[in-house]
Amino acid sequence: MIFWHEPGYVVAFTTRVGGVSVAPYASLNLTRGTGDDAANVEENRRLACEDLSLEYGRLAFNRQVHSDTVLRAEAGVRGQAGDGLWTDERGIPLLAMSADCLPIAIVSTGPRRALAVLHAGWRGLADGIIAAGVAALGDGPKAAIVGPAIGPCCYEVGPEVSERFDEDLTVDAKLDLWSAAERRLRAAGVERVEQVNLCTHDHPELFFSHRRDGLARGVQGVIGALA
């Protein structure tokens, strides 16, 4: 796991390492949606929570649909359509999954603690998923981290995608999602933005990648909770 050491929170980005699934889902795959055995996926999710000392039975996650919808998390509630969850309650682990899209965590750094996790592909970014996630946390100072995702080295797009973003973010038909996310976070008022800067496409030993592997593959994700 890749940890974000943010006081008052537990936030980590999973890799594909450390689970029970077999190829092509080896090994810490967090979704059943691409064909993996359901029991293996459940065990992988449990292991990920256990590694963070979080209660698996209270884990919440969305049925991700490339939207700008951010929902308030309820302990153990899974499968509602949306691409973000937020909470200001302790003890509710939140999961957002990705396999090239951006996994993002946003936290309040003022007296009132609150956390959001987002799954942001180009559609979600263009449609406002980041602004929705920041708004869900209310007023006050905030920080964010953008996790492993397909990098500007590898994310080829057509003009119908690149035209949704600042012109300088597409070079040689490759879109820089990392910078696009940071700009939107800052525009939404996030004061501190960190980046993991690891490309999922370029690191098959660590990450699943839809662009590299197609549909028969797993996902990693960001897991977060109030400490």
Image (cartoon, rainbow, N blue to C red):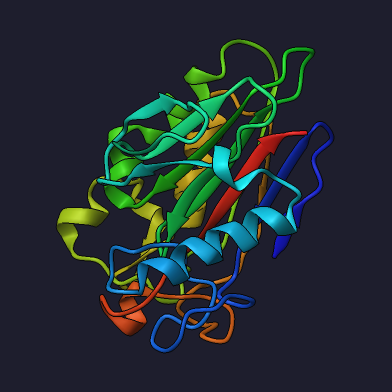
Picture quadrant of residue 77? top left
Name the residue at 66% across, 43% down.
55
In-front residue for pair 27/98: 27
Q: Examine the rendered structure and indicate whether residue 220 appears above or below residue 213.
A: above
Residue 196: x and y in percent read 65, 60
Which residue does the image show at 56% across and 37% down from the upper left? Answer: 58
Q: Establish if 189 lies above or below 99.
A: above
Name the spot of residue 208 as percent of width and height, x first.
45, 75
Residue sitting at x 22%, y 50%:
163
11 shown above or below 132:
below
Which quadrant of the rendered structure holds the C terminus? top right
Rendered location of residue 83, percent (x, y): 36, 40
Q: Residue at x 19, y 65 (%)?
A: 158
The total number of labels drawn is: 0
Q: Quadrant of the N terminus?
A: bottom right
Q: Look at the image and tell me whether residue 150 can be seen.
A: no
Is residue 227 shown left or right of residue 135?
A: right
Q: Is residue 156 left or right of residue 84?
A: left
Q: Quadrant of residue 218?
A: bottom left
160 or 86, which is in the foreground? 86
Question: Is residue 156 visible in this depiction of the protein?
Answer: yes
Give the percent coordinates (x, y) of residue 78. Answer: 39, 40
Depth check: 75 or 203 in front?
75
Q: Vertical placement of 138 versus 117: above or below?
A: above
* Residue nearest the viewer, comparing 14 with 124: 14
